[in-house]
Structure formats: structure tokens, C-alpha cells
Image (cartoon, grey):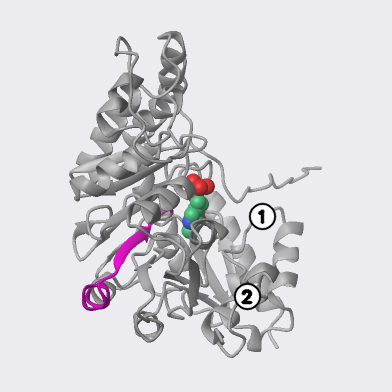
Amino acid sequence: MLLVVSVPIPFHLPSISSADTEAVVSAMESGWLTSGPNVRKFESRFAKTVGVEHAVAVNSCTAALHVALAACGVGPGDDVIVPTMTFAATAEVVVHLGAAPILVDVDPDTLSIDPNLAAEAITDRTRAIIPVHYGGHPADLSQILDIATSAEMFVIEDAAHAFPASYQGSPIGGIGDVTCFSFYATKTITTGEGGMITTSDAGLASTMRSLSLHGLSDDAWSRHSPGAAWDYAIVRAGYKYNLTDMAAALGLSQLDRAIEFRDQRAAIADQYDDQFAGVPEIRPLVVRDRAGHAWHLYVIRLATDGLTIDRNQFIQVLNAEGIGTSVHYRPLHLHPYYSERIDQSKRYPHATRAFAEIISLPIFPGMTETMVDRVASTVVDIAVNHRR
Ligand SMILES: *Cc1c(COP(=O)(O)O)cnc(C)c1O
């Protein structure tokens, strides 16, 4: 008797090659473990890749966002506009600086911030807006930049999902005032933990670099390299957010394959699109013409009105079939910390509705066509078997 056992398909698996491992080992063997030559090289190659003047490596995207807001002068009494459909990091750093995150609803097609609602949320306290390129699909930057220019506020992009991505042909990383990337374990390229800040503003770059290492003067940073002088000047109260050289070595090696990874994810997205076409209960998010998508996430919305099971039950059935999924995200206004603090008259109908319908499916470079087919056919079967 032939026993067919389906191997579980995880939600995500990082793609670590032997070149990655060798790069990290050689960084370890070099005798220089903290920020040094590999970090400098990672910064300059990353800057070149996204076509921007300055890049500052940090140990997470959360740190990047924190340092970016601080460099833009965000502090007590200020408001910062953030989409409610995001990860904790986007808003918590605003709170840490004594400012108030102002949650705004999202465009139901893309789940990125709705620029019209963002415009309505502006007051004379508004200092910055943090659009999130949800799933790797760029937010509506031209409208956001227009709003920001007329309101004289900073645009700090949360591009944790958006490397490599582009908007109207320009790479994400050189468009807003500051862009923040993540190299967390599950992101499009990884250093285990890590992040990058990019900007074309030399002054902001210098302040952010200083803030990321104890507020040392920008030139003192060079002492953090082999053979440098012992003295340094502290010019502000900074943070301890620098990236290690071992992590940067992994980043450099991953950077070599970023386009290859993206193309593989795009092919997976195409296959999902094909297999879901004509299944009305399964609705992939909309991709706009101007969007160069990074495909960090492949998100479907369930037409729950047409189904006898809800989103959570749908995920349970997928789990039972050995398919890993996730939900991005429970919107911030539906978390106790924020729900207790926001203006209760504000409602977020699009994010609330989306939260009840979304499922993120596996999309990572190591997925074979057979694996994608199994995920897609299982999703379709579940929908068909639970039609109302
Ligand atoms: C992952 C993520 C972050 C935080 O990135 P870290 O590198 O883990 O700090 C911020 N924003 C969004 C939207 C994310 O998905």
C-alpha cells in the first residue's frame, strides 16, 4: 500500500545559502565582530542599490523608525500619522518619543494608508506621516508627498516589506524624506535582526548615524573601525542601535540575491493569481499599475458572506492540511493599548472589515511550483466545500 504523506508547508523559510554561511564565518574569523568594514560596505552597496545618497545600518527597522523620527525632531506635543493596519513598531516609536500616533484607516484595495483620510487627520500638531508599504506594494506616495509638502511635515516610509520595490519606476528608498527597511528573519532579505535607513538629506543622515550610536559626533563614528583613534565626542543623547559586522556580512551576501528572491516571489504570486481566478470567495489584494511590488506578502481576502466558515475557521482547516499561514495584521485600533487611547468617535471600517477577511499565504523563494499548487488548491477546495 502506498501511503501518501503531505509534508507540512511552513508560512516562511529563510533562504540561507552556503555563500551566506561562509560570509558570516569569515566575518567572525576576521577578528572584528561589531560595526566595522562589513557594515560600511553594506551601507554603501544598499545605498547604490536603491539609488540614494546615504544609508545608515541599524539593528532593526524599529530602531530605524525611532531614529528617523527623532532626527526629524518629533517630540512631546507632536502628532504622527500612521495607518492602523500595521505592525506594533510603526506606532510604538512615536509613543517612545512622547508624541501621539494618529491612526488612519486604509485603502481597502491595497491595505496601505488612505491619503484622503490622512489629509483629514492633519492638524497644526502634525509633524510626520509614516506610510507603510503593506505587503511590499508601495503606498500612494505621490498623493502622500503632496499632502506632506503643503502641511510641511516629514514623510518617513515604513518599508519593512518593500525591498526591493519601486513606485512609478523609482526605487523605494529615495522617495520620502527617510525610508526604513527591515532585515528581520522573515523579511525579503535577512540579517537575522537588522535594518537600514536611507535618505538623500546629508544633515538627517548625519544626525541619524549619531543617534544610532550613543550620540557620538558623526566623525567619531569612524573610530568604530579597526585602527581608529580612542577619542570621541558625545553631541546628543543617543541610542545603541548599531548593526554587527557578522549581520552585515550576511546582509551583503543576501543583497546579491535580492532580485532573484523577488522574481521567485513574483512568480509564486502569479501562480496564486492564476489558480484563484474565477473563485469568487478568494480575492487577492489589488496591484496598482504604478507599483513595483516586492511581494513580501501574498494576502487574500475571503468573501466571508459567501462562506459558511469564518476566517479563523478557514485558517484552522488550512493548518489541519499542514499549511502555515499568518494574518497581517490585527489593526492597531483593535489592540487594548491603542483602543483605550484613541478617540472612540473615530472608526476604521476598512481595516476592521479587512481584519475579519485576510489570510497571508506562504510566499518564499524556496517554494516549488508543486508546493504553491498544493497551497492554492487546498485554499480553493476549502472555499468550494464551504460555499453558502
Ligand atoms: C517587521 C516590521 C517592522 C519592524 O521590523 P524589525 O526589523 O523587526 O524591527 C516594522 N514595520 C512593519 C510593517 C514590519 O512588518
- The reply to whether callout 1 and callout 2 are in contact (CB within 8 Å) is no
Is residue 155 part of the magenta span, yes or no? yes
Rendered position, 141 above or below 271: below
Q: Residue at x 27, y 39 (%)?
A: 46
Q: Earlier in the sequence, mark 1 or mark 2?
A: 1
The amino acid pointed to by label 2 is Arg
Magenta region: 146-160
Q: Which residue is mark 2?
A: 341
Foreground of the two, 46 or 151? 151
Q: Would residue 52 be seen by someone viewing this image from the given angle?
A: no
The amino acid pointed to by label 1 is Ile
| Mark drawn on residue 303 | none
Q: Quadrant of residue 174?
A: bottom left
Q: Is disc 2's CB within 8 Å of ligand 1?
A: no
In which quadrant is the C terminus drawn?
A: bottom right
SS of the residue under disc 1: loop
User: Residue 379: horizontal and vertical position, in percent?
Assistant: 62, 67
Q: Which residue is mark 1?
A: 323
